[in-house]
Image (cartoon, helix red, strand yellow):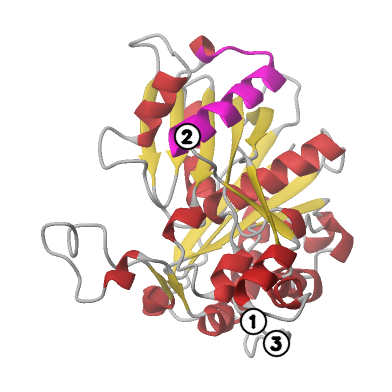
Amino acid sequence: MTHRADVPTPADQTPPAGHASGPAAPPQPVRVLGTGVHEPAVVVSSAELDERFGRPPGTSAARSGVTSRRWAGPGETSSRMAASAVAAALAAAGLDVADLDALIVSAVAPEQPMPTTAVLTLAALEAPGGACEAFDVNASCVGFLTAFGIAASGIATGRWRRVAVVATELASRGLDHTEPESSALFGDGAAAVVLGPAEPGESSAVLAARSATWPEAWRACRIEAGGTRWNAMDPPPDPSAYLFRMDGAVLLRHVARTVPAFLRDVERRAGVTPQDVDVLVPHQASGVGLRYLRERTGVRADAVVDVLADHGNQVSASVPTALHHAVASGRLRRGDTALLLGTGAGLTLSAIVLRY
């Protein structure tokens, strides 16, 4: 999202063309059993970045909304960070890795093309062979929500009983660190949840899940090289194509146009109103984006979980990190209604409404 101080007002809150409003599905009796995070070793303050870029003190924090963020140190790989977060979530759930039926990893950039980061994470956890299914999901910043939805559906249909979902992101490895705004906004990290079936008599459930994509905005957030188009065998004309590029102003305009109707549809499917939402757990896209949620969505401003200042935008790890913070701090309690909301490249919007 953009770093500008203004928050655009959506011109039209009716569903845009192609935004189908589907039928409400029955709640899925799925429970969050535990959450966990891994915080990378290197703390980088915005004051350090101001000094590095020769900016007046306070510039980076004022423009990004981030006071400090963590970047991975030597030896902190995607899979090791993921394993650490999953281990913490399992401990919170009172479970062991041998209790898992599946592990789903969200990461924009995998640790390596193959085997998957999920396989490497199971190896780091010393999981027993043959007991657990494992695969990766890449849906940009909404990857965790996509994986959560897959896990919840698998549990509700009886495919799995206990599933770990973890987002692990090393944004710092894909940034152009000569570009001050990206360096100031993004942080690394991993966060996980362990999901299982709600027991009889429990109110925990996934009330609704929804994703939608507006591909006309695909240029606004991209890494063009590193896949089959441009790579070591067929390098790009400009090596910077391997690095992250974002047009925050374009993204924010698309978000402002699409989020209101998208949220109303999700709330209708879940059978809730904005006032019913006890906790809104959003992707920590930017300070401007979080202010937009507080001012324009109808959800109480104090319901929005904001951990941007000391984490930065952690890509798909933002939502589970904020969710863990809400649980660990006591803001999200059993029986509360939580709205998990993400915005990602594409443009893709994703949301899950759950009764915690």
Residue 9: mark:
3
Which numbered disc flags the more N-terminal residue, 1 or 2? 1
Q: With respect to residue 245, does 343 lie above or below?
A: above
Could you tell me which residue is drawn at 47 percent across and 34 percent down?
75
Mark 2 lies on a secondary structure that is: loop
Mark 3 lies on a secondary structure that is: loop
The residue under label 2 is which amino acid type? Gly
Task: Measure the C-alpha gap from mark 3 to mark 1.
Answer: 10 Å
Task: Measure the C-alpha gap from mark 2 to mark 3.
Answer: 44 Å
Q: Which residues are magenta?
A: 76-97
Mark 1 lies on a secondary structure that is: loop
Could you tell me which residue is drawn at 70 percent across and 77 percent down?
63
Query: Residue 318, image x and y in percent?
Result: 62, 52
Task: Measure the C-alpha gap from mark 1 to mark 2.
Answer: 47 Å
Q: With respect to residue 24, does 329 lie above or below?
A: above
The residue under label 1 is which amino acid type? Gln
Residue 13: mark:
1
Front residue of 217/74: it is: 74
Image-based side of 194 in relation to 239, left or right: right
Q: Quadrant of the N terminus?
A: bottom right
Query: Residue 154, image x and y in percent?
Result: 46, 30
